Each structure stands twice: as C-alpha cells, then as structure tokens.
Image (cartoon, rainbow, N blue to C red):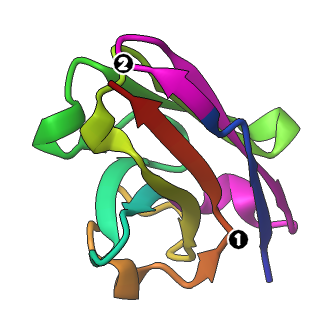
Amino acid sequence: QVQLVESGGGLVQAGESLRLSCAASGRFFSTYVMGWFRQAPGNEHEFVAGITWNGDNTYYTDSVKGRFTISRDNAKNTVYLQMNILKPEDTAVYFCAADRRSWARTIRTTRYEYQYWGQGTQVTVSS
C-alpha cells in the first residue's frame, strides 16, 4: 500500500513557475512508475507526465513538453513536477499517482492503470 500527498499548488500569473511535490509512504515506492495527472472542471483526468522507478525514462503529454519536468528522489520518497511558463490552460487539480508494476520500464498514460492516488493540489494560472 502507498499513500500519496501532494503539495505546492497555488495561484500564479501566466509565465510564472510552480513546483509540485508528492510525498509517498510505503516500502515499495522506489520500485513504482509514478505519474502526474490533472483534472480541469468538467474534464476527465489528463495524463501530464510519468517517470520510471529509477528515473531513467520520462514521458510527457505534448502540451507540457519543454515546460514541465518530472523527477524523483527515492531516498526521500518524493516525486516532483517542475512547471515553468505556466499558461491559463494549465489550471487544474493536479494528482500524483503510482503504478505498482515494480521495476517497470514503460510508462502508462491512462488513469485506470494507476492504483494509488493522492488527494490533489489546485493549480490556478491567471492571464
């Protein structure tokens, strides 16, 4: 079992940056693929970024490539999402999620393939 707690959301202006953190508990965190998803009002969960267990492989949705960076520190049981050049369309609740396939080399992009979820953190970008 893994518990996930996101932090770092807030209200910023377009062009500014935020760094989200996701603190995990549970002994197997370091073996899981981790992902960030977001959900805007009225929309489904959207995959944003993912990272393999050792950080060797990352994957991003097209709309955030070049602006967002996912990383992890397994010693701290934490995954991060650095968001730069934020746009109003990035406004959403951001969730971190864990895919419990230990040592997987591939990153899945649909919400149903992630078994553990945090409660979410709100990111609002004003124009």
Q: Which residue is drawn at 40% across and 46% down?
A: 91
Residue 62 forms part of the magenta stretch: no
* Residue 14: mark: 2
Above or below: residue 121 compared with residue 77: below
Residue 107 visible to the viewer = no
Q: Which residue is drawn at 27% across and 75% down?
A: 43
Picture quadrant where residue 9 is located: top right
Residue 14 forms part of the magenta stretch: yes
Residue range in magenta is: 11-35
The CA distance from mark 2 to mark 1 is 25 Å
Q: In this view, does 91 lie to the left or right of 78?
A: left
Above or below: residue 50 compared with residue 63: below
Q: Which of marks 2 and 1 is in front?
A: 2
Q: Position of residue 65 (x, y in %)?
A: 20, 28
Q: Residues within 10 Å of mark 1 (few under 14, many from 20)?
A: some
Q: Residue at x 55, y 85 (%)?
A: 115
Q: Position of residue 96 (x, y in %)?
A: 58, 59
What residue sits right under mark 1 in the picture?
A: 119
